[in-house]
Image (cartoon, rainbow, N blue to C red):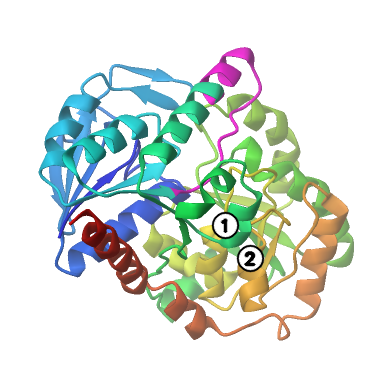
């Protein structure tokens, strides 16, 4: 099967969406499919065409940035050729160019499947409201033109204004998640370097530093946690500096964080690859995902942590609360409530065996090969209908 995957950003750009797309594309390739990823050349240092892990990547030139998106005038031209040469088209939303690609799939008789990752809520501002409205319209048109839509959980679908419009052509499929195996020596070296055996317990946050991620909720909860656990520390992995569109948010919170850094109670690790992250998770006692709005639909990092036996304390957002409920590995807190988050983290830390769960079962449930098989069944069903 020739599978065309289309999205605005692909690796090395790091986000839950790009990681999902990369894992799924690799899984398709490993299962013998011919996979092409069409994306944008958002960084001029990246090659226009390359093949990585059996996946061909085609990057369309970018002429300008608009908010968190890009303008790529030749996107439609390249899409026409690629859609024609493939059997099925998979698009990752949110994506401005999705309706044009989905229309081409319809015209050429190729099934188009949308993977909807999250709703769109850009930061405050008149221009961002305009961009948000345009992107929502584009996503809506893509939903009309597509043959089918995939999302992570029914819980998220039931509460998404977008997905509720397309309930008749919606299938929940869990996201692909995998982590490299860490060595005891590497885990111990990380513990020594960051004193995670001495500065206990360790609270992890693995995400970009962005306003929707709820970093301030953890900051506000920290004094209550430190009252119970004076030696607690936060390990923050993910891009925290120069995050696109988030400088004002970072500038507002960083003075408070610096105070905790000076006391050894907060450590920024920066952007880490999966191998580096694999030694972080075993050093945590709990991970938290205190996200504030529906731009977060699941929180893949919760599953990565759970694969290492680490429980989670997420907010009660639809979809984000599901990993804890599905695997009984943590406690859900109220959205945007620091006292509730502190209570959830303290409860988990005080009852670790209760929330340890079954790490091997979690690995099996999210194995990329299994997730790729679910997509294959959907693709084959849609192609059968076309025939």
Q: Residue at x 57, y 78 (%)?
A: 309
Q: Give the number of marks.
A: 2
Q: Quadrant of residue 330?
A: bottom right
Q: Are marks 1 and 2 in contact (CB under 8 Å)?
A: yes
Q: Is residue 221 left or right of residue 51?
A: right
Label 1 SS: loop
State the residue in front, 86 or 108. Answer: 108
* Residue 73 appearing in the image: yes
Is the C terminus in the top left, top right, bottom left or bottom right quadrant? bottom left
Residue 124 position (above or below residue 278): above
Left or right for 338, reference 203: right
Q: Nearer the viewer, residue 278 or 309?
A: 309
Read off the residue under disc 1. 298
Given residues 297 and 210, the one toward you in this image is 297
| Drawn side of residue 120 relative to residue 285, left or right | left
Residue 118 colored in magenta in the image: yes
Q: Is residue 42 at least partly visible in the picture?
A: no
Q: Which mark is residue 253?
A: none
Reading the image, the residue beneath label 2 is 322
The residue stretch that appears in magenta: 116-132
Task: Based on the picture, tell me whether residue 378 belongs to the magenta stretch.
Answer: no
| Residue depicted at 60% across the width and 38% down the height | 210
Q: Is residue 135 above or below residue 378?
A: above
Instruction: Name the element at disc 2.
Output: helix
Name the residue rendered at 38%, 45% in the picture: 92
Quarter location, residue 294: top right
User: In the image, residue 346 lies at what x, y percent?
Assistant: 82, 68
Task: Provide residue 165's location: percent of width, then percent of height.
Answer: 56, 43
Q: Is residue 84 left or right of residue 26?
A: left
Q: Sequence-wise, which precedes: disc 1 or disc 2? A: 1
């Amino acid at each position: 099967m020739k599978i065309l995957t289309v999205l605005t950003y692909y690796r090395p750009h790091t986000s839950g969406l790009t990681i999902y797309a990369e894992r799924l594309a690799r899984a398709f390739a490993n299962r013998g499919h011919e996979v092409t990823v069409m994306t944008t050349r958002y960084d001029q240092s990246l090659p226009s065409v390359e093949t990585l892990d059996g996946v061909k990547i085609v990057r369309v030139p970018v002429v300008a940035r608009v908010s968190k998106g890009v303008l790529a005038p030749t996107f439609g031209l390249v899409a026409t050729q690629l859609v024609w040469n493939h059997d099925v088209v998979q698009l990752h939303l949110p994506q401005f160019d999705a309706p044009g690609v989905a229309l081409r799939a319809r015209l050429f008789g190729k099934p188009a499947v949308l993977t909807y990752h999250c709703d769109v809520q850009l930061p405050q501002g008149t221009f961002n409201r305009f961009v948000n409205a345009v992107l929502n319209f584009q996503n809506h048109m893509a939903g009309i033109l597509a043959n089918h839509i995939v999302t992570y959980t029914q819980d998220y679908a039931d509460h998404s204004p977008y997905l509720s419009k397309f309930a008749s052509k919606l299938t929940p499929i869990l996201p692909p998640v995998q982590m490299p195996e860490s060595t005891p020596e590497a885990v111990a070296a990380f513990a020594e370097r960051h004193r995670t055996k001495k500065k206990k317990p360790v609270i992890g946050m693995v995400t970009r530093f962005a306003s929707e991620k709820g970093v301030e909720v953890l900051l506000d909860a920290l004094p209550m946690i430190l009252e119970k656990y004076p030696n607690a520390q936060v390990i923050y992995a993910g891009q925290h500096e120069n995050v696109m569109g988030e400088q004002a948010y970072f500038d507002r919170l960083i003075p408070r964080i610096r105070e905790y850094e000076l006391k050894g109670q907060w450590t920024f690790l920066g952007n880490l690859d999966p191998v580096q992250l694999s030694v972080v998770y075993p050093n945590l006692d709990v991970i938290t995902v205190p996200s504030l709005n529906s731009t977060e639909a699941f929180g893949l990092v919760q599953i990565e942590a759970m694969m290492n036996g680490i429980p989670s304390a997420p907010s009660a957002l639809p979809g984000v609360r599901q990993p804890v409920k599905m695997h009984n590995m943590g406690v859900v807190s109220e959205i945007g409530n620091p006292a509730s988050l502190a209570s959830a983290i303290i409860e988990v830390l005080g009852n670790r065996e209760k929330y340890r769960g079954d790490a091997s079962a979690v690995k099996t449930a999210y194995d990329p090969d299994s997730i790729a098989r679910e997509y294959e069944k959907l693709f084959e069903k849609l192609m059968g209908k076309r025939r």
